[in-house]
Image (cartoon, grey):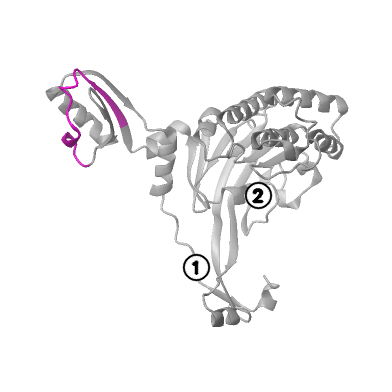
Amino acid sequence: MRDETVIDAEGLTRHFKVYRKRAGFWAAVRGLFRREYRLVRAVDGVSFQVRAGEIVGFLGPNGAGKTTTLKMLAGLLYPTAGRATVLGFVPWERHNAFRRQFALVMGQRNQLWWDLPAIESFQLHRELYEIPPGDFQQRLRELTEALQVGKLIHQPVRELSLGERMKMELIGAFLHAPRLVLLDEPTLGLDVVAQAAILDCLRQFNRRYGTTILLTSHYMRDVEELCQRIIVINAGRIVYDGGLQGVVERFGRHKVLRLQFHTAAGTPGPETWNGSIEVLEHRPPLVKLRVERDQVSRLLQGLLAHWQLDDISVEDPPLEEIITDVFTTTAPPTESREPQTVRPAADGGH
């Protein structure tokens, strides 16, 4: 089943009409009768496929269209244009058979009963998804042990910490053994220990059940530990789809050089380097530089000809830095902001 296509999106588009409020009293009065709107292209012609068993990172800056895309794939939003099938279903048709095979988890958005122990929500979940009692108990035991929250499922959800609540949300999502899980910032705001536990649980469930996972996160650690493939979206359009190493080769314009000179006295000063070379660290005899990729060879030749070096290392910058470069170098498309004037009655009052 590894060759099965779980998500198939083609030209997926979602536009929102946003009310343009003018400053001033008379402008507000005019707005009661003639409203102006601008068109926001939240998702603009997105196409990609995800195969069974993949863990794919879906990355982009705030407002890039990540959450809107996930909501369309989950059937919570209708697209303006384009098509998508998820697990063989059109998601916004919301067939029961489709909803039983996937889960959507949105970080810091509680889906459990706030005043009840989590186990009560889990029992309701078992009834709704018609999970056989034996399967329910087995998965509940596996998940609570993996996340180390066995003693907490009997506490009211409101008494749990943010990290503990997020673990409960994941348990609820995985209890019916979904074939696909859509995760929107699952580790947002969590401490390092809670993040590690959640990442390990996701990895285990993927390996054991072949669960397909589409993950959005601002934490590059999540992406590096779980994903072999990433999709980068910016201003509603996909700007990269491929392996982690591929994004380094395509967008990693710099290298980080770590130079260990023979002595502190024999270390060039910060003023030695020209404007295109950034000094990241200068602790003689150690110097750390950020250098344009195409300048590395020439710089090293010059250094070896004039300075005594004990050690040299050339590394790619952190993935987080490279992804940031992707966001800044992929210019957003020109957005249509032509105001549309309509009467409130024609727009249903919105």
Q: Is residue 193 visible?
A: yes
Instruction: Give me the residue at 19% from left, 21% from top.
Output: 264
Please, is residue 233 above or below residue 243 in the view?
A: below
When the figure is inspected, residue 68 is found, relative to residue 122, above or below; the finding is below
- Residue under the point 59% across and 32% down: 55
Q: Position of residue 9 (x, y in %)?
A: 61, 47
Q: Which residues are magenta?
A: 256-275
Q: Which quadrant of the view contains residue 185?
A: top right
Residue at 54% over, 33% down: 222
Q: Position of residue 131 (x, y in %)?
A: 84, 32
Which residue bears the numbered disc 2?
71
Question: Which mark is drawn over residue 337?
Answer: 1
- Can residue 87 be seen by looking at this rendering? no
Which kind of residue does numbered mark 2 sit on? Lys
Instruction: Determine the image quadrant of residue 288.
Output: top left
Q: CA distance from mark 2 to mark 1?
A: 24 Å
Tell me where residue 80 appears, x and y as whole percent: 62, 60
**Amino acid type of the residue that numbered disc 1 sits on in the rendered structure:** Arg
